[in-house]
Amino acid sequence: MPTRPGALERRLALIVITDRGFAHPGTVVDVVGDALRAGAQAVQLREKTQPPRKVLPLARRLRADTRHAGALFFVNDRLDLALAVGADGVHLGPHDLPVAAARRTAPTGFLIGYSADEVDAARAAVRDGADYIGCGTVYPTGTKPDAGQITGIDGLRRVVLAVDVPVVGIGGLSPARAPAVIAAGAVGCAAIGSIMGAANPGRAVTGFLRAAEHATGQP
Amino acid sequence: MPTRPGALERRLALIVITDRGFAHPGTVVDVVGDALRAGAQAVQLREKTQPPRKVLPLARRLRADTRHAGALFFVNDRLDLALAVGADGVHLGPHDLPVAAARRTAPTGFLIGYSADEVDAARAAVRDGADYIGCGTVYPTGTKPDAGQITGIDGLRRVVLAVDVPVVGIGGLSPARAPAVIAAGAVGCAAIGSIMGAANPGRAVTGFLRAAEHATGQP
């Protein structure tokens, strides 16, 4: 089992979400390597357009690298790919396999995250077995043009108050914006562009982690 | 376990592959119902464009109907969806999760089919754990415009001779063409348009099944 009680929320202080198009100037593997060395403890592989056969080598590499670093590894959308590479969990959204179906299919201890931007959807996902909620879009972002409406910090706070699992903010987040996310009660941030597109991904990771540590009093 | 030794190839005399666009004048559920009543013993749900959340209700319904009829139920591409609805198997192709990865992920006895149009790919899939091969495109077809080159009856025969698992022909097949497929050594046919688009799907099913029975001497 990847986590002990209470450990999950600490490890979700930052979820580094991959994006092939964003990973400049390095490759996805390079940027994730930088992020892991800087202390990131959760990585999510997000490949919306590539077929599973093409994604598999990258998924295996990131699984190996995260395991080596003691970090959690999630796969977006595809439970089958997640299970095939031995990921710690899957991150699901409204168009994916429902949480309840994934929970019945996955082995005990397998983590399930769910994207919900409002209270009812978040509560339903937790009732169905979600281990954490990714809530947003907190701020407008170009990375997910289909992300729908903006929840803002107030919407994030409402979701945090509504569920008893960790909530991670997502959408337009940066180290500068992380304190507001943490102040709203989220355990951390999920970030794509501000890490994958950073000139110095390690420094961005450090910024995110400091914001979460400051709020929880972790050293 | 869905099959006993030898039973699989008899049940693969015909694989009815669903196609939402083709199911006229009835719905997919109606056409599959007709096919099952006519004796079809294998159904494959094929939904290339719909997200899993939208496909799930149909998958559950077809799983229930095939179970009621004692027929096998396969899901195309998505191992996770197949596992979530309790399908008997998954049908994979070159762009999907590799057979070896699916085999490691799926429970014992779960069936894996693989689309291969030539000998090397078929052998590799069987080595990796495929239970049967779907070989084609045997004849040109409009249902899979991306199907690649035409294998013909000769190409089908080469694949049949190369592997020791059941081979099912696919691509442009009809009851009239089924005898040639069976004569090439295939255990049966997979069909989309000639059943889903038939005025009388039951009659088309009967035609396919007779061709397979004739060859194997089944009553």
Image: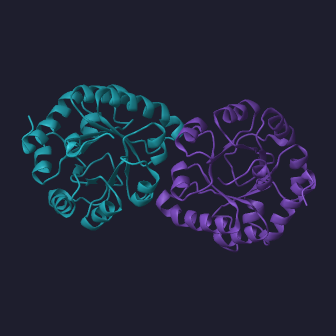
Chain colours: A cyan, B purple
Between A148 and B177, the one lying in front of the other is: B177
User: Where is residue A174 drawn, in percent x and y?
Assistant: 18, 41
At 58% from the left and 37% from the top, the residue drawn is B98
State the image quarter where residue B209 is shown.
bottom right
At 49% from the left and 35% from the top, the residue drawn is A56
At 90% from the left and 49% from the top, the residue drawn is B180
Question: Is residue A27 visible from the viewing direction of this image?
Answer: no
At 63% from the left and 64% from the top, the residue drawn is B20
State the image quarter where residue B156 is shown.
top right
Quadrant holding the C terminus of chain B = bottom right
Q: Is residue B180 above or below residue B38?
A: above
Q: Is residue B133 above or below residue A155?
A: above
In this image, A199 relative to B81: left or right? Answer: left
Question: Is residue B90 visible from the viewing direction of this image?
Answer: yes
In this image, B166 relative to A18: left or right? Answer: right
User: Where is residue A111 drawn, in percent x and y?
Assistant: 34, 47
Count of numbered marks: 0
Between A40 and B7, the one lying in front of the other is: B7
User: Where is residue A191 drawn, in percent x and y?
Assistant: 26, 42
